[in-house]
Amino acid sequence: MGKNRLEAFSDGVLAIVITIMVLELKVPHGVGIADVQPLLPLFLSYVLSFLYVGIYWNNHHHLLHTVKQISGGILWANLHLLFWLSLFPFATAWMGENHAAPLPTAAYGVVLLMAAIAYYILQYLIICSHGKDSVLGRAVGPDLKGKLSPLAYLAAIPMAFVSPWISSGLYVFMALVWIVPDRRIERALKES
Amino acid sequence: MGKNRLEAFSDGVLAIVITIMVLELKVPHGVGIADVQPLLPLFLSYVLSFLYVGIYWNNHHHLLHTVKQISGGILWANLHLLFWLSLFPFATAWMGENHAAPLPTAAYGVVLLMAAIAYYILQYLIICSHGKDSVLGRAVGPDLKGKLSPLAYLAAIPMAFVSPWISSGLYVFMALVWIVPDRRIERALKES
Amino acid sequence: MGKNRLEAFSDGVLAIVITIMVLELKVPHGVGIADVQPLLPLFLSYVLSFLYVGIYWNNHHHLLHTVKQISGGILWANLHLLFWLSLFPFATAWMGENHAAPLPTAAYGVVLLMAAIAYYILQYLIICSHGKDSVLGRAVGPDLKGKLSPLAYLAAIPMAFVSPWISSGLYVFMALVWIVPDRRIERALKES
Amino acid sequence: MGKNRLEAFSDGVLAIVITIMVLELKVPHGVGIADVQPLLPLFLSYVLSFLYVGIYWNNHHHLLHTVKQISGGILWANLHLLFWLSLFPFATAWMGENHAAPLPTAAYGVVLLMAAIAYYILQYLIICSHGKDSVLGRAVGPDLKGKLSPLAYLAAIPMAFVSPWISSGLYVFMALVWIVPDRRIERALKES
C-alpha cells in the first residue's frame, strides 16, 4: 500500500543525487595534464560519495524489502533521510575542492552523521511498526555496523580540525565496511 | 489505466525538483565559518521548500491512491500542479539569497498560492470524476486545511511588503500544519 | 515485453527535461521589479516549452498504451524522439533570452519540427508492427493534426527571419491545438 | 526479487546522464550564426554520447531481461557501470569543447573503455549466477562485439596523441557497430 511509490520516489532522488554530484566536476578550460590535476581530489571525493549513495541505495533496498505497511511516520522518516542525502553534492564539492581544509572535511562528516541517524530512525520506525519479532526485527538484531558508523563519524568531525587526513581515512574505512551488503537481512529472510 | 505512468511521471518531476534546489547552494570558495554563514538563510529556505515538496508528494500520493480513472482533464490539472512546483527552486533561491527583501518573499508566496490552487483544482476534478460520495469525496469533506492554506498565502503576499518576517513565519506555520499527512483519507479508507 | 522499461525511461527523460528547463531562469541578483522584468520573455518561453513537453508526454502515453511488442526499431525511434526533446532546454533558453531575434526563434522551430518528425516515425513504426487494422492503426487514421504540425513548424522557420512574432504565434497556436489529448485513440479503444 | 528496483534505479541514472549532458551546451549570448558555430563540435560530441548511453540502456535492458536473482555482487557491478556512465557528461564536454586536442580525446576513450569493462564484469557475474547453459549464457556465446569494443577503445586512447581524428573515428565506428541491438539474446530467447 504505497510502498511502490515510496521506493520509486526514493530511487528517483538517489539517482539524481548520485548523478548531479558529477556536475561539480567543472570541465577544465585547458587541455593539458596540469589542467585536470586540480580536479583529482574532487574526483576522489566524488568516488567516495558515489560509494556512500550506492551503499544507502543498497541498504534502503534491503530495508524496504521486508516492509509491508507504510505509515505517515515512515514516509517522513524516509524524506528526512533523503534530505540529508541531498546535501551530498554540496558536501562532496566543498570537501573535494579544499581537501586538506578542516571545516569542509568536518562538514562532510556532519552530513554522513545526520544521514546515518536518519537511516537509524527510519529503521527503528519500520521495526516498531512490524514488531521486534518480525523478519526485519530479528535480522537487524544487535546491529553492530549501524551503531559503529555514527560513532565513527562523530569522532571524525572534531578530528578534522586536528588532521583532516585521519577524518577522510575514517570516511573511506566506514564506506568499505558498509560495501558488504546487509547479509543479516538476506540470511534471516532465507531462514524464515 | 495510465494511473501508474501519471504517478511515475509526477514522482520523477517531484524527485528532480526536490533535488535540484540544492544546486542553488553554491559551494563557497573559502573554507572558513565566514564563508558558509551567508549560505544560512538560503539553507533555511531550502529546508522549508524541501518540506513543502515533501508535503505535496505525500498528499499527491494519498490523493491519487483512491483514483481509478485518469481523464484528460486530470492529466492537465496534474501537469499544471507540476508546473508551479517546478518554480520552487527559482523562488527558493531568490528568497533565500535576499531573505529580508519584500519582493522575493512575496514571489515565494505567489508560487505557494498557485501550487495550492492547482492542487485544489486537481482534487476537485478527481472528486468530480468519482462522485462526491466516493471514498475520496467523503474523505476530503469540509477540507479546512485545503481552504485555509490559499488564504494564508494570499495574506502573506501583500504582508511581505510590510514585514517579510511575518510572511516567512506564515509559510513556516502552514508547512507545519500540513506535515501531518491527510489522515482524513486514511480514516475514510479504513471505514469504507 | 520491455514496454514498462521503455515507458519508465521515457518518463524519466521527459521529467528531467521539463524540470531542468527552469534552471535557465537564473536567479536575479537584485530584488526589485526591474530585476525580474528581463526574465519575463524567458518565463513565457518556459511556459510554452512546458506545454510542449507535457503534450509529448501525454501523446506518448496514449501511443504506447496500445503497444504490445517493442522491437529494436521502436526502441531507437523512441530514443531519437527523446534526443530532440532533450534539446528543448537549450532552444527555450536561447529563444527566451533573445525573444525578437530571428535565428533563436528559427532554431526553436527546428527543434519542434525534428521532434514532430521523430514522433511521426515512432508512430509509423508502432503502427507497422501492429498492423494498420490494429486499434492504434484505426485510431490514428487520417491524422490531420499530426500532418499539420510539421507543416506549421516548417513554415515558421523561414518566417522567423521576416517576423519572429508570427513564428512565435504559430508555436503557441500549435501548442493549443495539441493540448486536447488524442481523443481519437481514446475513442477507438472504447469502441474496440 | 529486487530486479525491478535495480532496473528502475539504473533507468533513473541513465535518464539523468543522457539529459544533463545537454546542460553543457551553454546558451550563447549572441544571436548570429557565428555565435552558435563554436557549439557545433560540442553538439556532435553530445550526439555521440547520446548514442552511447542509448546503446548501454538498450543492452542493459536486454541483459537484465533474462536475470532472475540479483546478488550483492551484481548490485555492485551495476553501480560500477553506472559510475563510469556518470562520467559521460564530463568527458563529452571536455572533448567537445577541445575537439582536436589529444588529452580530452584520450580521456573520452578511457571512460568508454572503463564502461565497457564494467559492462563485461556485470555480464560475467550475471552469467555466472545463472549458469553458462542458461538462456543468457548461450546467447552471449563467443561475444565478438563485446570483446572487440574494449580493444578498439584501448587502441584509440594512445592514438589520440598521434591523431585525435582517428580516435574520434573509432568511437563513432564502434557506436554504429553497437546500434544494432543484441539480437543474439533475442534469438536465444525465442529458441528457448
Image (tube, coloured by chain):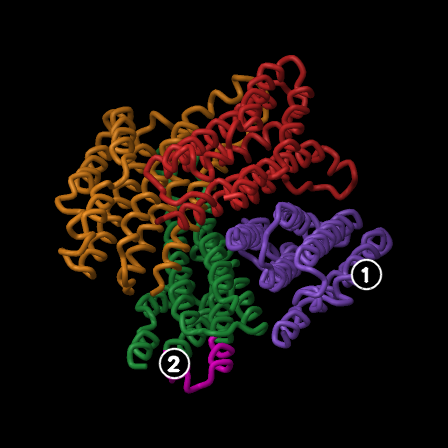
Chain colours: A purple, B red, C orange, D green
Q: Is residue B191 left or right of residue D155?
A: right
At a point 69% along the width and 60% down the height, the residue shown is A131
Q: Secondary structure at mark 2?
A: helix
Residue at image point 55% right, 51% down:
A6
- Judged from the image, the secondary structure of the residue bearing numbered disc 1 is helix
Q: Amino acid at mark 1?
A: Ile
Residue B65 in sight: yes
Task: Residue at 39%, 45% (x, y): give it.
Answer: B68
Residue A30 in sight from this viewpoint: no
Whole-percent x, y for residue D183 in the image:
31, 74
Rendered location of residue D9, percent (x, y): 51, 59
Total labels: the figure holds 2
Image quarter of residue A147:
bottom right
Residue D140 highlighted magenta (yes or no): yes
Q: Which residues are magenta?
A: D123-144
CB atoms of marks 2 and 1 within 8 Å: no
Q: Is residue C154 above or below residue B153?
A: below
* Mark linked to residue D135: 2
**In terms of depth relative to the viewer, which is nearer, B67 or D45?**
B67
**What residue does disc 1 label?**
A166
Callouts 2 and 1 on one subunit: no
Type of amino acid at the residue the image marks with label 2: Val
Residue B27 on the magenta span:
no
Magenta stretch, main secondary structure, is: helix
- Chain letter for mark 1, please: A
Count neighbours of disc 1 (C-alpha within 10 A) and say few if under 14, some if 14 to 19, many if 20 or more: few
